[in-house]
Image: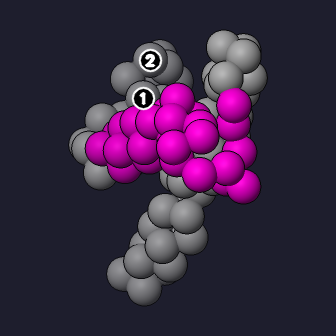
């Protein structure tokens, strides 16, 4: 039980990190201003992508889906 709590607790901080890095890439592709050094008023697309990625990642991590198990064949 304690191992599971530690494992889940160490994985949850990865959600905003991955959302931020993906947002930088997408905002760069769209030629929009990006970066946490800018205010949300100066980079609204970037902050919108961060929010969308964080919410989406949190929903996926809290859901009961098994993306690895459902696509692999049983051995």
Q: Quadrant of the N terminus?
A: bottom left
Secondary structure under badge 1?
Answer: helix
Q: Position of residue 39 (x, y in %)?
A: 59, 52
Percent from the top left, x then y, of residue 25? Answer: 72, 27
Does 74 sit above or below residue 23?
A: above
* Residue at 50%, 78% in the rendered image: 6
Residue shown at the point (60%, 40%) measured from the top left: 42
Label placed on residue 67: 1
Residue indicated by mark 2: 71
Q: Residue furthest left?
A: 64
Q: Secondary structure at mark 2?
A: helix
The part of the chain drawn in magenta is: 33-61
Residue 22 visible in the picture: no
Query: x%, y% of residue 4?
Result: 43, 73
Q: Which is more foreground, mark 1 or mark 2? A: 1
Magenta residues: mostly which secondary structure? Answer: helix
Distance Cα–Cα, label 1 vs label 2: 7 Å
Residue at point 72%, 16% (across, down): 31
């Amino acid at each position: 039980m304690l191992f599971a709590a530690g494992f889940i607790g160490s994985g949850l901080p990865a959600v905003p990190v991955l959302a931020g890095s993906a947002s930088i890439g997408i905002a760069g592709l769209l030629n929009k201003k990006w970066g946490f050094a800018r205010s949300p008023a100066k980079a609204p697309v970037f902050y919108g992508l961060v929010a969308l990625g964080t919410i989406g990642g949190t929903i996926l991590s809290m859901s009961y889906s098994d993306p690895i198990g459902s696509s692999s064949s049983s051995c």
